[in-house]
């Protein structure tokens, strides 16, 4: 299986999919992160491009991911990029990685880059219906603390998880990968703190019968009974 994690910013892949991605990689599957805003521009107080690239590579290594796909779209300004440009960039990543499962942002996230990434990804995964021979991927929305949890009522329906991955034994790696990104982790009660990241994992575990879990919302899942239900 090939997994593609399509996110706006470096570190979103860890916050949203650090556990699921590491578990897939450990099981022998190929996992790649695709960052639409892969450069350091407007990352206040954080490392320069070279430093950010080193942080990205360290985080991917900790999680067992393959080489990342780095977009050069403007950070915190994805709303200024034509939707088609984002869609075509993601389509290229889908083809290059032959993705079977795709993770992206929930469209109700408070971060506007996440919304535009999610919308473009929803359009891009329909490539199989526009081009014969392209794989039909599953699509899941991930939960990114300090964005998904900061959404306010009045917009789109909020994150409603229906898929849970056992995070027991994997939270230390997720936290190590987060710490690979210098200047990103905060002290509690900020959501990007060890305390809150662990608390969310235990809460999601309580919803799903695990000591700890990482949660997702199914956006698209189609296939044979074996593909969908396992076997
Ligand atoms: Zn982000």
Image (cartoon, grey):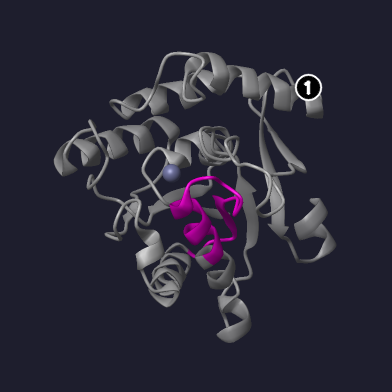
> In the image, ligand 1 is in what quadrant?
top left
Q: Can residue 131 be seen in this snapshot?
A: yes
Q: Nearer the viewer, residue 179 or 226?
A: 179
Determine if the C-beta at disc 1 is less than 8 A from ligand 1. no
Left or right, 47 with respect to 203, comes to left
Look at the numbered disc 1 and give the secondary structure of its residue. helix
**Number of numbered markers:** 1
Q: Can residue 5 be seen in this snapshot?
A: no
- Which residue appears farthest toward the front when viewing the image? 154
Q: Nearer the viewer, residue 179 or 60?
A: 179
Q: Label 1, on which residue?
A: 206
Left or right, 90 with respect to 50, comes to right
Which corner quadrant of the image does residue 212 belong to? top right
Report the residue at 23% width, 38% height from top: 52
Q: Does the stretch in magenta take in 224?
A: no
Report the residue at 30% width, 39% height from top: 56
Left or right, 194 with respect to 164, comes to left
Q: Position of residue 215 (x, y in %)?
A: 67, 37
Q: Position of residue 178 (x, y in %)?
A: 41, 27
How dense is the environment of label 1, judged by Cα within 10 Å: few (below 14), some, or many (20 and up)?
few
Q: Position of residue 14 (x, y in %)?
A: 46, 35
Which corner quadrant of the image does residue 170 belong to? top right
Quadrant where the N terminus is found in the figure: bottom right
Report the residue at 41% width, 63% height from top: 79
Q: Which residues are magenta?
A: 98-119
In this rendering, is residue 63 above or below 202? below
Q: Does the stretch in magenta take in 106?
A: yes
In this rendering, is residue 24 above or below 225? above
Report the residue at 30% width, 32% height from top: 58
Q: Position of residue 51 (x, y in %)?
A: 18, 35
């Amino acid at each position: 299986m090939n997994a593609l994690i399509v996110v706006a910013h470096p570190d979103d892949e860890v916050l949203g999919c650090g556990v699921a991605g590491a578990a897939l990689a450990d099981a022998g599957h190929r996992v790649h992160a695709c960052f639409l805003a892969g450069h350091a521009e407007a990352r206040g107080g954080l490392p320069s491009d070279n430093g950010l690239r080193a942080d990205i590579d360290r985080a991917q290594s900790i999680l067992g991911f393959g080489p990342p796909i780095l977009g050069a779209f403007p950070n915190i300004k994805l709303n200024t990029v034509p939707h088609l440009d984002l869609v075509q960039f993601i389509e290229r990543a889908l083809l290059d990685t032959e993705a079977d499962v795709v993770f992206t942002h929930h469209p109700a996230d408070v971060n506007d880059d996440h919304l535009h990434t999610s919308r473009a990804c929803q359009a891009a995964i329909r490539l199989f219906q526009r081009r014969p021979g392209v794989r039909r991927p599953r699509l899941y929305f991930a939960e990114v603390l300090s964005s998904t949890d900061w959404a306010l009522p009045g917009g789109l329906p909020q994150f409603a998880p229906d898929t849970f991955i056992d995070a027991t034994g994997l939270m230390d790696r997720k936290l190590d990968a987060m710490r690979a990104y210098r200047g990103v982790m905060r002290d509690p009660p900020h959501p990007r703190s060890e305390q809150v990241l662990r608390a969310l994992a235990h809460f999601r575990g309580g919803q799903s019968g695990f000591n700890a879990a990482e949660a997702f919302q199914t956006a698209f899942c189609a296939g044979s009974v074996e593909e969908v239900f396992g076997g």
